[in-house]
Amino acid sequence: MDWKRLLLGTIMLLVAGLAAAESGTLPSPLTSDGGLRLGIVPFASTSNLLKIHRPLRDHLAQTLRRQVMVYTSTSHERFLDDALSGHFDVVVTTAHFLPMLVDDGFVPLVRYRNTFDLVLVVHKNSAIHGIGDLRGRRIGLPDRLSFYHIVGLQWLHTIGMEAGRDYTLSEQPSHRAELMAVALGRIDVAITGFQALLQLDEDTRSQLRPIQAGTLALPSMTTLAHGSLGKAKVAEIQAALLSFPQSGEGARFFETTGYGGYVPATMGDIENARPYEAIIRRFWSGRTDHGDDIDRVLEHGQ
């Protein structure tokens, strides 16, 4: 189910909260200091993002004793626009956006312990068994400003392959869309992370076969809070996040997603991502506040 269908299906339930969010005010908070707007980079479909992160939303709402609203955007570019336009208090994002977000006032809190290994995913019956079998194939990557699109193209370039000459590039809306396209035979290969495979249903996963793409390991996703919340609230949110893996739901979350838990994020993580900033700025159309046209509400948790 894509974001439009989800919004149509839930609009009657969310209309009050959506109107309040768009007008710059928050729905009725659990405490006097307001709700928390949690923005998640759109690495999966809207419905799957909500399903995956519901335990985190519930933990934060309970621990912080305030309403937590989960948001996403329709693309990675829109997510960057939305974050820089002040639509999120806390963001969960991939490494390539970190420098721009920190420069805009976000504070790094935690990142996932496990790295994202780059893998090729093919159909279980595919004749592709290694890197040497990629030439002439249809290769899928998520949308053009996603981390995996950028590093996937870089990796293909390092093995001497260029789009249009050595393979056909198929841009997909998300990692799950890539993998479903492979399962259905619409493309030959998806370039993604092993965690994306873990988050599929068993029936779909059984139709696929991963191939390790060399030794490249990517930084894990990082959670940041905007400094405008104040040092006390930022520290409170960081503590709540660090307590999540110790809860029963948190332990299951990290087991099923393959993220491996949290470790504190550092400014070193930000500096390691600096080389990607120039690439982002090359393809990014520039900050745009989409205002009333924003389509990012997933669900309110309280």
Image (tube, rainbow, N blue to C red):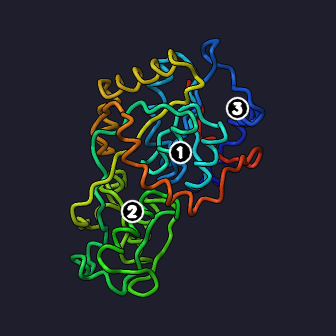
Image quarter for residue 207?
bottom left
Q: Is residue 281 left or right of residue 94?
A: right
Is residue 200 positioned above or below 129 on the image? above
**Could you tell me which residue is drawn at 30 percent across and 68 percent down?**
120
Q: In the image, which is nearer the foreground, mark 1 or mark 2?
A: 1
In this figure, which residue is indicated by the disc labeled 3?
A: 17
Disc 3 marks which amino acid? Gly
**Could you tell me which residue is drawn at 26 percent across and 72 percent down?**
124
Disc 1 marks which amino acid? Met
N-terminal label among 1 and 3: 3
Q: Is residue 36 left or right of residue 235?
A: right
178, 85: nearer the viewer: 85
N-terminal label among 3 and 2: 3
Image quarter for residue 252?
top left
In this figure, which residue is indicated by the disc labeled 2?
A: 151
**Could you tell me which residue is drawn at 39 percent across and 71 percent down?**
182
- Numbered marks: total: 3
Is residue 251 positioned above or below 176 on the image? above
N-terminal label among 1 and 2: 1
Disc 3: CA contacts within 10 A as few (<14), some (14-19) or many (>=20): some
Label 1, label 3: how many angstroms apart (C-alpha)? 29 Å
Element on which disc 2 rests: helix
**Image x and y of residue 172, in percent:** 50, 67
Label 3, label 2: how many angstroms apart (C-alpha)? 37 Å
Disc 1: CA contacts within 10 A as few (<14), some (14-19) or many (>=20): some
**Image x and y of residue 122, in percent:** 31, 72
In this figure, which residue is indicated by the disc labeled 1?
A: 100
Q: In the image, which is nearer the foreground, mark 1 or mark 3?
A: 1
Q: In the image, which is nearer the foreground, mark 3 or mark 2?
A: 2
Element on which disc 1 rests: helix
